[in-house]
Image: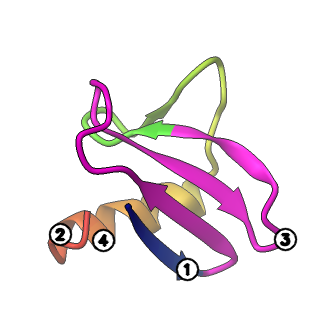
Amino acid sequence: MGRIRRNGYVIEWFIGDHDPRHVHVYDAKGRFMGRLNLNTLTGHEGWNPDKKLLKLVSELQKQGRL
């Protein structure tokens, strides 16, 4: 399992988790917000992540952190 805390988000992922490749996103208080597909940068189950989160995840992917 990996975890990153940034900009009011907690982003978690599990090694060997099921496809599609995704992360679990929580707010700063630990409340679950949703799951984010890392290939398409879209939310699962109808969740619409905000642009701030999408920008953060894109930056982390470019840095090789996700």
Q: Earlier in the sequence, mark 4 or mark 1?
A: 1
Of 9 and 53, nearer the camera is 9
Residue 60 circle label? 4
Vertical order, 12 against 17 (above or below):
below
Which residue bears the numbered disc 3? 29
Which residue bears the numbered disc 1? 5
Real-space CA distance between mark 1 and mark 2, rounded to the nearest whole angstrom: 17 Å
Region in magenta: 7-35
Real-space CA distance between mark 2 and mark 3, rounded to the nearest whole angstrom: 27 Å
Real-space CA distance between mark 1 and mark 3, rounded to the nearest whole angstrom: 11 Å
Which residue bears the numbered disc 2? 62
Q: Nearer the viewer, mark 4 or mark 1?
A: 1
Q: Earlier in the sequence, mark 4 or mark 3?
A: 3
Q: Is 7 left or right of 22, judged from the image as shown?
A: right
Q: Nearer the viewer, mark 1 or mark 2?
A: 1
**Dot 1, how many residues are within 10 Å of its Cα: few (below 14), some (14-19), or many (20+)?**
few
Tag 2–tag 3 contact (CB < 8 Å) = no
Tag 2–tag 4 contact (CB < 8 Å) = yes
Q: Amino acid at mark 2?
A: Lys
- Image coordinates of residue 46 in percent, x first then y, are 65, 19
- Image coordinates of residue 61 in percent, x first then y, are 23, 64
- Residue furthest to the top in view is 45
Q: Amino acid at mark 4?
A: Leu
Secondary structure of the residue carrying numbered label 1: strand
Q: Earlier in the sequence, mark 1 or mark 2?
A: 1
